[in-house]
Structure formats: C-alpha cells, structure tokens
Image (cartoon, grey):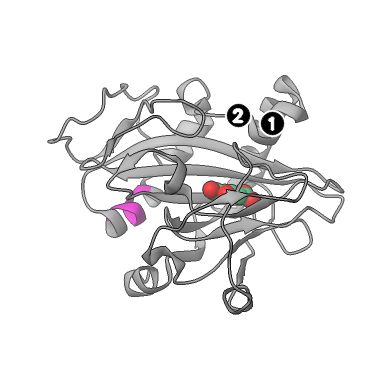
Amino acid sequence: MNRDFYEANGYLTGIEITPPNEVEAIRAQFDRLEAEVGRDKARIGLLDRHFDTEFIWRLAANPAVLDIVEELIGANFHLLATHFFCKYGKEEKFVAWHQDVTYWGLEPPTALTVWYAIDDSDRENGCMRVLPGTHLGIRAHGKSAQEGNLLSINQEVPVTFEEEQSMVDLELKAGQASIHDGALIHGSLPNRSDRRRCGLTLRYVPTSVRQKVTNSVGKRYTPVLVRGEDHEKHFTLEPSPFPFP
Ligand SMILES: O=C(O)CCC(=O)C(=O)O
C-alpha cells in the first residue's frame, strides 16, 4: 500500500480483497439480491443494504479493507454508507465526472470510497476512471448535458482537455478494489459489453467529520463506527448490524 501515492494522486487500485476461491460466492449473493429487487432497482437503488444483508456488511467491515482505510484516514472512522453501481450491457448509462464530497454535506469534506468489484470491471464494460491529482480542491459542479447520467442530481464537473488526457482507467478483477479520495474527480463510461459491471461502493469518514447539511437527496447519514473510538460524537450512530468478521 502506497500512502504517498494516494496523497499525491488521490487513488489506489488493484487491491486484493477477496481470495479468488471466494469471489464466486460473493457474486452469487449479489445475484440473489439483484433477482429479489430487479435490475432497475439494482442499478443504483441499493443503498445502505449493509444494515439488512450480511454479505455487504462483511465486505464493509472486512479487516483487509479497514486496515487500508485506517492507514489513509487514521485510527477512528465510520462506515458512512454503502451503494451499488451496476451498469448492464449495452445501455447508455454512465457516471459523469464529479467529486463525491460536493454533494454529501460533510464538514470538513473528508471521506474516501472503497470501490469493490463484484464483477470484472474493464474498459469495455465501463470501469471507473479517475483524474489523478484533482483531489486537492473542490470545484463548482454544473449539470450534465448528456442523457443517462446515473448520478443523483445529474451533476457534472467541467474538466479541461489536458486533465482528460491524464485520465486513468481503474480496471479490476472481481474481488479486487480501488480507493478514491472523496474529492477526486472520477466517473465512468457506458457499458459497451454484454457483461454486467457491478461495483459496491463503501464510504468511510474519520470520526472528526460532521454532517453540516443534508446530502443531495435530502438525507442524513446513519454511520456505524467500524474502527477505533468516536470521541467527537458528531453523528447518531447505528450499532453494527451483524458481528464483525
Ligand atoms: O461505479 C461507477 O461507475 C461510479 C462510482 C462513483 O461515482 C462513486 O463511487 O462515487
């Protein structure tokens, strides 16, 4: 794990989380959840299901994940939220360039996301893309002019031609993860394959962060303390929904 790289570039990638022999079992659990709720809901409607679905909790509280998060944001932190992003084959759905913390209502705007690959995620099926080093300031966002943006309020941040040239595709095998700083500009293109591209985002914040205003969809977060101690008590915490793995 390279903390200096993360601080300079705002992301890490290719992190092995799940041993290859356990990847299929996790995918099968997601497949069951998807079959239960339907694809329309599974696309971006599975929010905070770690509270009632144990395999999601077990990924969010996986010691391998928490150890890396601890190195990056310190010893005391909450799981803020979980959210699946699924893009099905041959759809014009995409994720416009954006910075997460501009619409989460946090103060200070410090957060990170672990993007866990349920499926292989590559250029063809619309893997995550990042603009390295863009996490060092918050920018004004506008609205995307393109149909199919999966983001909650159709937000998009303008980027320069030069910045786009520096773009990095975060290709992952199922069971691997990338991490991005909450201020890093990122997005993803449509899925041009016949394969599903599903990722589980795990959002973490240091306990020193508070929620100043509701997020872009009017929600107050209900975090779970997953490491260390909550000295600041800025949130009304939920207990861990299942035992820690
Ligand atoms: O999964 C994607 O394509 C986008 C995910 C994303 O925007 C996020 O993690 O904030």
Vertical relation: 103 (above or below) 36:
below
Does residue 117 appear in this view?
Answer: no
> Is 69 covered by the magenta stretch?
yes
Vertical relation: 32 (above or below) 2:
above
Asked which secondary structure carries label 1, the reply is helix
Residue underneath mark 2: 46
For the N terminus, give its image quadrant.
bottom left
Does residue 156 appear in this view?
Answer: yes
Q: In this view, does 217 lie to the left or right of 146?
A: left
Mark 1 residue type:
Ala
Residue 156: x, y in percent?
60, 52
Tell me which segment is drawn in magenta. 66-70
Q: Measure the C-alpha gap from mark 1 to mark 2.
A: 6 Å
Q: Which numbered circle lies on residue 144?
A: none
Q: Is residue 218 left or right of residue 175?
A: left
User: Residue drawn at (53%, 32%), measured in percent from left and top?
Assistant: 55
**In which quadrant of the rendered view does residue 24 lie?**
top right
Residue 219: x, y in percent?
44, 25
- The answer to whether marks 1 and 2 mark residues whose Cβ atoms lie closer than 8 Å is yes
Residue 211: x, y in percent?
31, 34
> Is 61 covered by the magenta stretch?
no
> What type of secondary structure mainly makes up the magenta span?
helix
Mark 2 residue type:
Leu
Asked which secondary structure carries label 2, the reply is loop
Residue underneath mark 1: 42
User: Residue drawn at (21%, 44%), measured in percent from left and top?
Assistant: 76
Residue 120: x, y in percent?
69, 55
For the C terminus, give its image quadrant.
top left
